[in-house]
């Protein structure tokens, strides 16, 4: 398996024009967006500007849902990439994915056995509390990656905190990977876009912000040394999304090199790219992860890519900028290289 792991992206922030849909509080992917505005009563503001109110959050279900922008699955008019939403059995009530399939090459004599395509599994950003597979940023990004790389893409709509605290998101990520793997030759998977078009010798994992790593544990570098309060705030937020943690920022879910964490020597991929941005508050965390991989007994190849002058999630929030186009081209080249 091959993996690309990005450390410079994230969901959330900004808006894009277009169709506006109303979310429902029963939706596992968008329910935490209720916290994007303050409520009456006592509240705590955490590092990603989410409000937690008192009395308990369960009372939120009786409030009218917020209006949030989403993109329905469809055929993208610009890239002609088709997308559809699929519920994963037997977890259909809690877990779904959005699939993307690029258009077949224009050919007067269509091949009855079309070429197998690389598979990209994507985990959106949003600090484990916002974002979804249907948000405009993720949807636009996956349409572009599927088109440019000629890949089948799988965007995982994992559960979000605080209604579903960690490790729910990680459990969903693993369940989604198992579901994808079930479509390999000889497996029981029945989704044709994967079973018939996916090349299981070329599987890539891409994540943005919370997708590949924990954004809450980021201030462990120069900024944290200059301002210890950053680490304290990160610790507070980590316990907000993972109240069951016993070790705080030293939990293996936040620190893959912590004592007791699974050995990265067993990392099941051949290559890793860690993408960071110069002005991103997660930059030091990405560099640290890259150096940790290089220093470990893992036998794969690691590469660090840094985009100068850019901030958090620039490639998702501003995909038309020159730096985003450059990073996208490097991602596509990575997917299509041997």
Image: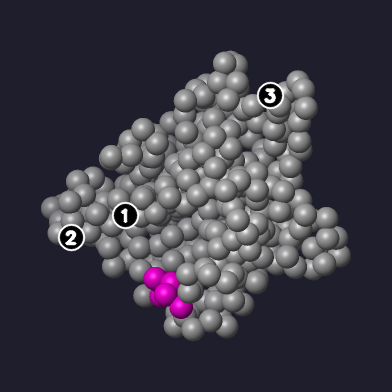
Tag shown at residue 185:
2
The N terminus, quarter of image = bottom left
Residue with the mark numbered 3 = 55
Tag shown at residue 178:
1
**Towards the viewer: 44 or 248:** 248
Dot 1 surroundings within 10 Å: few (below 14), some, or many (20 or more)?
few
* 235 lies left or right of 190: right
Residue range highlighted in magenta? 265-270
> Percent position (x, y) of residue 282?
68, 60
> Which color scheme did the rendering employ for the protein?
one colour
Distance, label 3 to label 2, CA atoms, is 51 Å
Of the numbered discs 3 and 2, the one sitting upstream in the chain is: 3
**Towards the viewer: 98 or 239:** 239
Marks 3 and 2: CB-CB under 8 Å? Answer: no
Residue at x 33%, y 61% (from the top left corner): 118
Residue at x 55%, y 21% (from the top left corner): 61
The C terminus, quarter of image = bottom left
Secondary element under disc 2, as helix, strand or loop, is loop
Secondary element under disc 1, as helix, strand or loop, is helix
> Percent position (x, y) of residue 148?
43, 56
Dot 3 surroundings within 10 Å: few (below 14), some, or many (20 or more)?
few
């Amino acid at each position: 398996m091959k993996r690309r792991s990005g450390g410079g992206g994230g969901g959330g922030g900004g808006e894009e024009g277009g169709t506006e849909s109303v979310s429902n509080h029963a939706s596992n992917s968008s329910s935490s967006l209720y916290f994007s505005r303050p409520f009456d009563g006592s509240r705590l503001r955490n590092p990603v500007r989410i409000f937690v109110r008192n009395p308990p959050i369960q009372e939120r279900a009786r409030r009218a849902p917020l209006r949030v922008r989403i993109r329905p699955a469809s055929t993208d008019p610009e890239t002609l990439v088709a997308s559809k939403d699929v519920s994963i059995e037997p977890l259909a009530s809690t877990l779904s994915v959005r699939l993307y399939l690029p258009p077949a090459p224009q050919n007067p004599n269509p091949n009855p056995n079309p070429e197998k395509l690389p598979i990209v599994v994507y985990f959106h950003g949003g600090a484990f509390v916002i974002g979804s597979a249907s948000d405009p940023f993720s949807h636009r990004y996956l349409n572009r990656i599927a088109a440019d790389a000629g890949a089948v893409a799988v965007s995982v709509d994992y559960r979000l905190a605080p209604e579903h605290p960690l490790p729910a998101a990680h459990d969903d990520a693993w369940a989604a990977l198992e579901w994808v793997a079930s479509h390999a030759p000889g497996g029981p998977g029945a989704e044709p876009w994967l079973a018939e078009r996916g090349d299981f010798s070329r599987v890539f994992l891409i994540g943005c912000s919370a997708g590949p790593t924990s954004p809450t544990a980021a201030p462990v570098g120069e900024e944290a040394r200059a301002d210890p309060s950053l680490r304290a705030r990160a610790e507070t937020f980590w316990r907000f999304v993972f109240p069951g943690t016993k070790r705080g920022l030293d939990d293996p879910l936040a620190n893959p090199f912590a004592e007791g964490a699974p050995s990265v020597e067993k990392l099941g991929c051949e290559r890793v790219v860690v993408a960071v941005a110069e002005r991103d508050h997660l930059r030091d965390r990405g560099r640290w992860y890259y150096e940790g991989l290089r220093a470990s007994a893992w036998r794969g190849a690691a590469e660090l890519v840094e985009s100068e002058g850019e901030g958090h999630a620039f490639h998702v929030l501003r995909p038309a900028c020159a730096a985003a186009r450059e990073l996208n081209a490097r991602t596509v080249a990575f997917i299509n290289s041997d």
